[in-house]
């Protein structure tokens, strides 16, 4: 009966070795509190970013916990992207709310020990979210037991004082193994987390590596590790344990910890030491006796936890199989649903289902006796109540801000996910002892190429609606035909669709009628949208009218093999942008990098974008392009590209225009060979504040004058960051165009560099166009158009003259 809480900032920060060790070796109730859900990260396995990435990464954490045995918690803090310093982090987060959520988790989970992943004493040395997680954890340790702190919580929980708080240190925090060997270790404990579990046939580190390999979208798939391995934790507060590896020293973690626990413990220790692996059901009478005794104890924290654990033991030893499944993956509030129950007792003990039904409603049937290994199947017709909430991650129900998700209901805060809305209860009598088990209604299916699968049952509206893209660009005054796609989630749906739009924009039809016969079918309605004359940004959202009902949700499914399929319902809308943009040149060659949507964005404003496979590049093959752009990290992900660089530079020499977006340099090869025609040295310099001032230093350069005049205004409305991996040294033939910096730092000049080479131009930029263009940021488009136009303006002038 010990409890340990591990605290860090992001999904994948957690040390699964230690979590698995605490859970499986120490057998503590172990939790991981990740302050954020990791929205700011990238995604190696799919398209989900930002809020959708938060859903995927939440599920990856739960998958990791199901392997290492931990539980999972969160605060409302939003991972808004890279932050260099906790001061910045705590300005964007609502510090009070995040601290309140940590205190809440401590009061609810009641950890005896807290372990921080990061050091609260070294701000600026790692991601600001990391240091903030440690700073706030230490603060929470100090105030969780203070009844004046967040006193509103005390109607639902009591104060709690954890006994100790540690920092999970390692040589890495000391810069080198040598430094760490020399460090003062009087406050450190060393645990061997490489222990072997003979019953599982696995080492702790094999479990830990399997757990962290669930973070697939972050590229955390890794080999399993075996063998002895030290782990260090440094005491921050509380008394130092005298014994070598007992974090819980001084805490009674036996059954005596709870009132009335001793006789229960006696029964269970007996079962444990004489466990019959051949016939586990032989322990059922003892377990039922312990369960009955536990039920009679006064209500307490441990009572609830141990009742659940005992129930699971009872189910396991008796081989009891209970499930409630649906043949449909989705249903709507107010609909009828057939739920199929499968019940099977695989022991010789007497098990009776005295009643069963949907939680919150009357029992559907009574007195079903489960005989040994005789399967019972029952179909239950249920009515999904009209007020059943839609399936959606609860933190996405309300509009969120850059730094915080909005969750008003205190009970939800901290929960990893939304609890399933439809659950079936089974009132059992096992050898005469009453016991209730609940199971969520899940969708069960099988696929020839996958086998049997389960996924959460989705509660969704009768119809959902979507646009093809999140941003629509209008680079001139001509109207665009915009498809609006409506999907029915019940048969025989009739209604009409209306677009809600902002002043200045025009839509050709007020309403369009539709009729869909079959559930699951999608139809397309075309609306013609005319932009205003002047620059403008607005949002357009479709409304489905079904009688008096108005629906506006877009259905998004997040489906991967390593997580349960997630149903997300967000307001359907698209950003519409009217930008007056001048451009010269038409044919752009694009060499893909680590995945970005820039080619799509450039097509939106009228360029012909041709994807170039590096293996097809040869002398002269590039001459037909007005400009060539390489995607982010193209040279990092495409080995072959480095060998084609001479052709790219040759293209520039002959009058071409080459734009290289950021690449990262490893520690050793800081200077990429021939990445640029002149010396250029990459660094990790970045400007993370997307609102930081930008100064145009090369005011008269064509890049900021032609064909679009760029001003400070063009740097308004940027998202997430200014840019990253800026070069820090360059040849004198380069002209730096811009200067920018994060608060309290010196200006960086390397975000946009240009140099003439032969007849052409070479541009290197770490500006985050890969984020800004898909977000529809006008200024970024105008600047990008200038980069593409560089050197082509003369062409244009000549044509004009010829034309005249
Ligand atoms: Zn992190």
Image (spheres, rainbow, N blue to C red):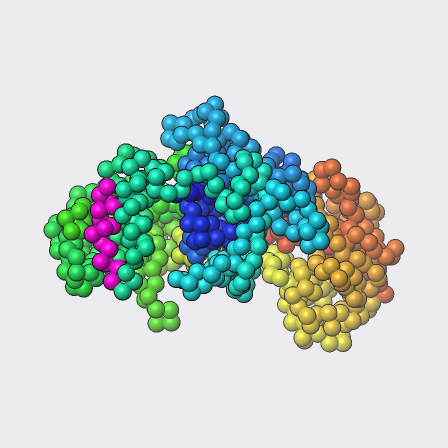
Magenta highlight on residue 286: yes
Find residue 472 and report its horizontal and vertical position in percent.
Answer: 55, 51
Q: Residue at x 12, y 55 (%)?
A: 369
Task: Give the magenta part as a residue range.
Answer: 279-293
Side of 316 relative to 352 (left or right): right
Which of the two residues, 500 or 332, is positioned nearer the viewer here?
A: 332
The furthest residue to the right: 732
Find residue 785 and report its horizontal and vertical position in percent.
Answer: 70, 54
Which of the two residues, 202 or 504, is positioned nearer the viewer here?
A: 202
Specify whether residue 34 is in view: no
Placement of the C terminus among the 4 image quadrants: bottom right
Q: Residue at x 29, y 51 (%)?
A: 270
Q: Main SS of the magenta segment? A: helix
Side of 55 relative to 182 (left or right): left
Side of 804 relative to 301 (left or right): right
The furthest residue to the front: 242
Which of the two residues, 798 or 226, is positioned nearer the viewer here?
A: 226
Placement of the N terminus among the 4 image quadrants: top left
Quarter of image, res 622 = bottom right
Q: Residue at x 14, y 60 (%)?
A: 371
Which of the two residues, 155 or 589, is positioned nearer the viewer here?
A: 155
Side of 30 relative to 10 (left or right): left
The furthest residue to the top: 148
Is residue 83 shown above or below 732? above
Find residue 164 and report its horizontal and vertical position in percent.
Answer: 52, 37
Specify whether residue 392 is in view: yes
Magenta highlight on residue 619: no
């Amino acid at each position: 009966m010990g409890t340990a809480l591990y605290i860090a900032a992001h999904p994948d920060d957690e040390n699964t070795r230690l979590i698995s060790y605490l859970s499986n070796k120490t057998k503590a109730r172990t939790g991981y509190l990740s302050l954020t859900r990791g929205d700011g990260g990238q995604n190696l396995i799919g398209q989900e970013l930002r809020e959708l990435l938060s859903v995927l990464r939440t599920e990856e954490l739960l998958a990791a916990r199901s392997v290492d045995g931990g539980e999972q918690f969160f605060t409302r803090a939003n991972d808004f992207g890279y932050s260099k310093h906790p001061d910045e982090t705590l300005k964007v987060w609502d510090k009070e709310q995040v601290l309140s959520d940590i205190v809440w988790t401590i009061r609810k989970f009641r950890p005896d020990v807290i372990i921080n992943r990061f050091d609260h004493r070294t701000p600026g040395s790692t991601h600001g979210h990391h240091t903030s997680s440690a700073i706030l954890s230490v603060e929470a340790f100090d105030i969780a037991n203070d009844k004046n702190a967040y006193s509103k919580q005390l109607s639902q929980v009591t104060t709690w004082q954890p006994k100790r708080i540690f920092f999970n240190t390692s040589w890495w925090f000391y810069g080198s193994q040598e430094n760490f060997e020399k460090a003062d270790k009087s406050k450190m404990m060393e645990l061997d987390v490489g222990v072997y579990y003979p019953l599982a046939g696995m080492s702790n580190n094999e479990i830990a590596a399997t757990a962290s390999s669930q973070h697939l979208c972050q590229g955390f798939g890794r080999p399993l590790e075996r063998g002895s391995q030290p782990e260090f934790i440094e005491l921050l507060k509380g008394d130092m344990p005298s014994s070598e590896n007992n974090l819980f020293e001084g805490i009674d973690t036996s059954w005596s910890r709870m009132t009335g626990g001793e006789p229960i413990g006696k029964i269970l220790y007996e079962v444990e030491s004489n466990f019959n692996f051949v016939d586990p059901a032989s322990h059922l009478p003892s377990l039922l006796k312990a369960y009955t005794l536990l039920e009679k104890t006064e209500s307490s924290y441990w009572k609830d936890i141990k009742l659940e654990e005992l129930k699971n033991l009872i189910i396991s030893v008796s081989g009891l199989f209970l499930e409630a499944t649906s043949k449909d993956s989705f249903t709507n509030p107010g609909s009828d649903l057939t739920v199929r129950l499968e019940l099977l007792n695989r022991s010789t003990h007497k098990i009776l289902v005295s009643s069963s039904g949907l939680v919150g409603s009357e029992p559907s049937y009574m007195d079903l006796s489960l005989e040994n290994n005789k399967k019972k199947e029952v179909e239950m017709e249920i009515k999904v109540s009209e007020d059943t909430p839609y399936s959606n991650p609860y933190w996405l129900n309300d509009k969120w801000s850059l730094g915080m998700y909005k969750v008003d209901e205190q009970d939800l805060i901290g929960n990893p996910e939304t609890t399933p809305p439809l659950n079936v209860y089974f009132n059992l009598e096992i050898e005469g002892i009453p016991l209730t088990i609940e199971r969520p209604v899940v969708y069960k299916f099988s696929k020839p190429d996958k086998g049997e699968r389960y996924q959460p049952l989705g509660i969704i509206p009768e119809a959902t609606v979507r646009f093809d893209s999140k941003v629509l660009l209008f680079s001139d005054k001509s109207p665009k035909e915009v498809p609006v796609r409506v999907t029915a989630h019940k048969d025989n749906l009739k209604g009409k669709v209306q677009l809600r739009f902002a002043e200045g924009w025009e839509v050709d039809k007020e309403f369009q009628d539709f009729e869909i016969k079959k559930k699951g079918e999608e139809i397309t309605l075309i609306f013609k949208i005319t932009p205003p004359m002047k620059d403008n940004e607005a949002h357009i959202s479709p409304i489905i009218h079904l009688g008096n009902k108005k629906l506006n949700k877009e259905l998004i499914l997040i489906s991967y093999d390593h997580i349960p399929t997630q149903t997300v319902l967000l307001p359907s809308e698209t950003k519409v942008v009217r930008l007056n943009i001048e451009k010269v040149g038409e044919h752009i060659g694009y060499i893909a990098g680590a995945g970005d949507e820039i080619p799509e964005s450039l097509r939106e404003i009228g360029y012909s974008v041709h994807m170039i496979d590096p293996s097809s590049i040869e002398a002269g093959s590039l001459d037909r392009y007005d400009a060539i752009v390489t995607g982010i990290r193209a040279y990092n992900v495409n080995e072959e590209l480095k060998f084609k660089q001479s052709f790219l530079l040759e293209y520039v020499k002959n009058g071409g225009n080459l734009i290289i977006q950021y690449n990262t340099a490893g520690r050793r090869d800081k200077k990429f060979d021939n990445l640029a025609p002149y010396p250029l040295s990459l660094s990790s310099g970045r400007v993370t504040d997307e609102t930081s001032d930008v100064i145009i230093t090369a005011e008269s350069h064509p890049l900021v004058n032609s064909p679009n005049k760029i001003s400070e205004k063009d740097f308004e409305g940027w998202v997430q960051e200014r840019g990253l991996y800026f070069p820090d040294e360059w040849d004198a033939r380069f002209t730096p165009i811009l200067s920018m910096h994060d608060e309290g730092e010196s200006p960086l000049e390397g975000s946009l560099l240009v140099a003439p080479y032969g007849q052409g131009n070479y541009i290197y930029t770490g500006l985050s166009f890969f984020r800004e263009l898909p977000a529809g940021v006008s200024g970024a488009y105008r600047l990008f158009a200038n980069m593409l136009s560089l050197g082509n303006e003369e062409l244009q002038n000549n044509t004009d003259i010829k034309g005249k």
